[in-house]
Image (spheres, rainbow, N blue to C red):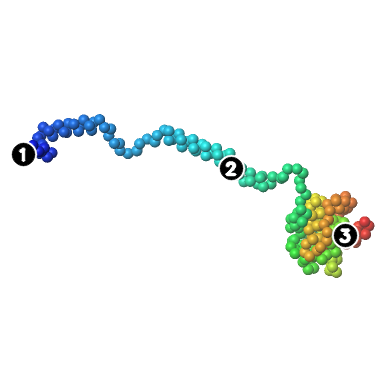
Amino acid sequence: MQSDQPKPEHRRAPEMQDRILELHAAAMREMSDPRDGMRPTPVAFLICCLLFTMWGGYYIGANAGDWTGDGLAEQANRAPAGPAAPQNPMVLGAEVYNACTQCHQADGKGLAGQFPPLAGSEFVTGDERRLAAILLNGINGDFHVNGQIYNSQMPAWKDVYNDEEIAAVATYIRASFGNKAGPVAKTIVEAVRKQVGAAGAWSEAGLAEFAAGK
Ligand code: HEC
């Protein structure tokens, strides 16, 4: 019969509903409320982050080398162990030749009427001692090169460059601009400097005498 069926909830007796509310209230009390908003970051996680950051800093410091500008320049300039290797005279000579281009020009052809050519000049490709003497002491006054007369001044380089540098630029101009003469040894410059280094600029005649008197 109908009275055997359990009644649907909304039709239960009011005492029964009170009982249900009571039971639920107890259950709600026992369970922790869900929290709203941020939870504090766990301390263990913070310690892990700190340790990783420190390790990263250490790793970069230990493996990066020297990243300062000075440090890089120092590394680039660090000479190989042992006695300094002699520089390639053609490389050094090309460097020194920068001091000559304003007059003799980059192509060694000089400037008509003002600066004599080094290309095809007997003074460049001929006697090595004479060439060393020109470079050390310079030239003053009338000077003939390839039938042309020049009357200007060739500066002295003895106080600017050492024997190795003068030998290098001599070697360079003898093998550039179409010239094909052999290198000039540093010992030749050294000997000429000892002999005439104290003298002033050459005259054309004085240079010819020096060259003849060897
Ligand atoms: C300020 C200009 C000037 C500079 C810089 C100069 N020279 Fe000269 N050089 C002359 C002049 C000018 C003569 C010709 C001498 C004269 O007129 O009295 C000459 C003559 C010469 C000669 C002999 C003549 C010839 O043409 O062969 C040589 C070699 C020479 N110079 C090499 C050099 C070299 C190498 C350098 C660089 C280290 C150099 N000169 C830098 C002006 C210069």
Q: Cα distance, mark 1 to mark 3?
A: 142 Å
* Residue 114 in the image: above or below residue 46: below
| Point 72% across, 45% down: residue | 80
| Point 58% across, 41% down: residue | 63
| Point 21% across, 30% down: residue | 26
Q: Cα distance, mark 2 to mark 1?
A: 91 Å
**Residue 152, image x, y percentages:** 81, 63
Q: Amino acid at mark 3?
A: Asp
**Residue 150, image x, y percentages:** 83, 66
Q: Nearer the viewer, mark 1 or mark 3?
A: 1
Is residue 155 in view? no
Residue that lies at the very extreme toward the right in this rendered image? 213
**Residue 25, image x, y percentages:** 20, 32
Q: Are marks 2 and 1 in contact (CB under 8 Å)?
A: no
Compare residues 22 and 88 and report the one nearer the observer: 22
Q: Residues within 10 Å of mark 3 (few under 14, many from 20)?
A: few
Q: Amino acid at mark 1?
A: Met
Q: Which residue is mark 2?
A: 64
Q: Residues within 10 Å of mark 1 (few under 14, many from 20)?
A: few
